[in-house]
Amino acid sequence: MSAGERVRAAYARIREVDRPEIWIALRDEDDAILAAEEVDARAAAGETLPLLGLVAAVKDNIDVAGLPTTAGSPAYAYDPEVDAPAVARLREAGAVILGKTNLDQFATGLVGTRSPHGAVRGAWSPDRISGGSSSGSAVATALGIVDIALGTDTAGSGRVPAALNGIVGVKPTIGLVPTTGVVPACRTIDCVTVFARDLRAARTAAEIMSGPDGVDPLARADAPAPALDARPRVAVPTAEHLGGLAPGWAEAFRGVVASLAANGVEIVEVDIAPLLEAATLLYGGAFVAERTAAVGDFIETHADLIGTDIDPTVAKIVLGGREARASDYFRDRENLERLGLEGLRRLDGTVALLTPTTTWHPTLDDVAADPIGANSRMGKYTNFANLLDRSALAVPAGVVDGKPFGVMLTGAPFADRTLAQLAERITAPAIEILVVGAHLRGQPLNHQLVAAGGTFARAVHTASDYRLYALDTVPPKPGLARVVEGGAAIAGEVWLLPAAGFGTFVASLPQPMGVGSTRLDDGTSVTGFLCERVALEGATDITAFGGWRGYLQGLT
């Protein structure tokens, strides 16, 4: 798919899902198409563009030239002259930026509701929270509007929304991606993160953005950890530290653990109490003063805007750091170091710690009733990672009660690639599916494939024992049927769908469409759409056109 085609499809999807709360600033469609055409021209001229044909969204605390940066507060807005390095590197690789996404104001929160632009609703259940603070970026990705999106992560903001919306969230080692051009939350532990619907796309973007920029003093070069062992050892919490999970989540987590064990992974139960205690220091100790240093002066200067432009909960948290003394910080620093030393000692010999990403998925009403208490439950397993300089990766791990369930791998600094290798043993392999009609690229139902996490793989033809019929449906679509004789090769496309997306996609197919094995002209077979015979009675045989696109061209 060309960049121009992908941008047009993205804006069509924006109109279809009608989720205005996702965006703080959305680029004009014509401007985005022009940028996409420039990318296509670069590719035609021979440039290698690893993100060609992908569209991206950027959390609105990261600078994008030409769009204001607000960090979720209109009064804070400024107009950056240049892209943040993370954004510039994505553009250089061929991605087209669509706009800036909503967030928990000043990246303070894990719920996605603390914004004057409104709460971002969950992608799967609009009565549930999206998670935050990178709320808009996660939902834009989950709904298939964009292929990748940038967030930030200090306490879990690039991982919790991934889990609650059934997507991948990559939190790189601190400093791998420069934070130049990022409004700080806690400057020393902030990370730029990536959301995507599949692990490969997320990791590709993270690799492209990595590397010092000569400006961020905390940026550092990669020092890759060893590749994954044939039989890696993975730590999991003891049962007592899996208490308080949403109904069904403990069982789902045990299922992931059992699957890994069956897949050649040695599982080790570990008491992670020191790590969980360290996590409480992020907001319960003097470390919150770093948030005060970042935006406290702004909030105090604009105190009259608290309750309108400035979220009251965010203001309370940020200004709470004024009470911390330097001596408090150093005591907490020592406590953190001792807890970290003991916690990491208990993980010695393991390549990663596997946990649920978060503990529950509250409704919007749950959070409104207890804004701080509801939020604090979200970060149980995420809060310690950046404090202790850990790499982390959140991946979807199934569905519980109709909503996504996710798990997280937390590892040593620079173990990012190793975690990705391990995550491949958790995520089910992609499933190939053949489409021959309205789900083809550029056709009216293609967005359903994209929303289910689909990725175009290749153009193909069936074996020469099929016939194609035009069905009387809305929107128009064909029916493919295998015949004993008189068949022909029919043009189509093979797409890759994650297992969860495949199940959702197939379950939504209307009659008379079904799914079955379809032979290709190279002798292989893939899953494809087949039509019930009864629906072909009276349908127009369009086999002679060689495929659905050929038929549509013939009509015009």
Image (cartoon, grey):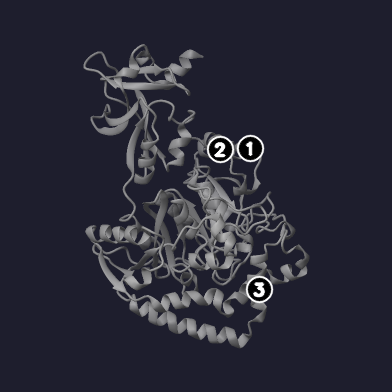
Kindly check if marks 2 and 1 are in contact, taking CB atoms under 8 A apart as contact: yes
Mark 2 secondary-structure assignment: helix
Residue displayed at 54% across by 59% down: 366
Asked if residue 276 is positioned above or below residue 454 in the image, the reply reads below
Kindly check if marks 1 and 3 are in contact, taking CB atoms under 8 A apart as contact: no
Q: Is residue 100 left or right of residue 194?
A: right
Asked if residue 343 is positioned above or below residue 82 in the image, the reply reads below
Q: Which residue is mark 1?
A: 29
Q: Is residue 246 left or right of residue 121?
A: left
Classify residue 236 by image quadrant: bottom left
Distance between the alpha carbons at the discs numbered 3 and 2: 39 Å
> What kind of residue is marked 3?
Thr
> Nearer the N terminus, badge 2 or badge 1?
2
Q: Estimate how packed mark 3 is, as few (under 14), some (14 to 19) or many (20 or more) residues with alpha carbons within 10 Å.
A: many
> What kind of residue is marked 2?
Val
Classify residue 420 by image quadrant: bottom left
The x, y position of residue 304, in whole percent, is 78, 65
Is residue 79 at all visible to an observer of this figure? yes
Mark 3 secondary-structure assignment: helix
Q: Estimate how packed mark 2 is, as few (under 14), some (14 to 19) or many (20 or more) residues with alpha carbons within 10 Å.
A: many
The x, y position of residue 374, in whole percent, is 53, 64
The residue nearer to you, when weighing 347 against 417, is: 347
Q: Which residue is mark 2?
A: 7
> Nearer the N terminus, badge 3 or badge 2?
2
> What kind of residue is marked 1?
Glu
Q: Which residue is mark 3?
A: 292
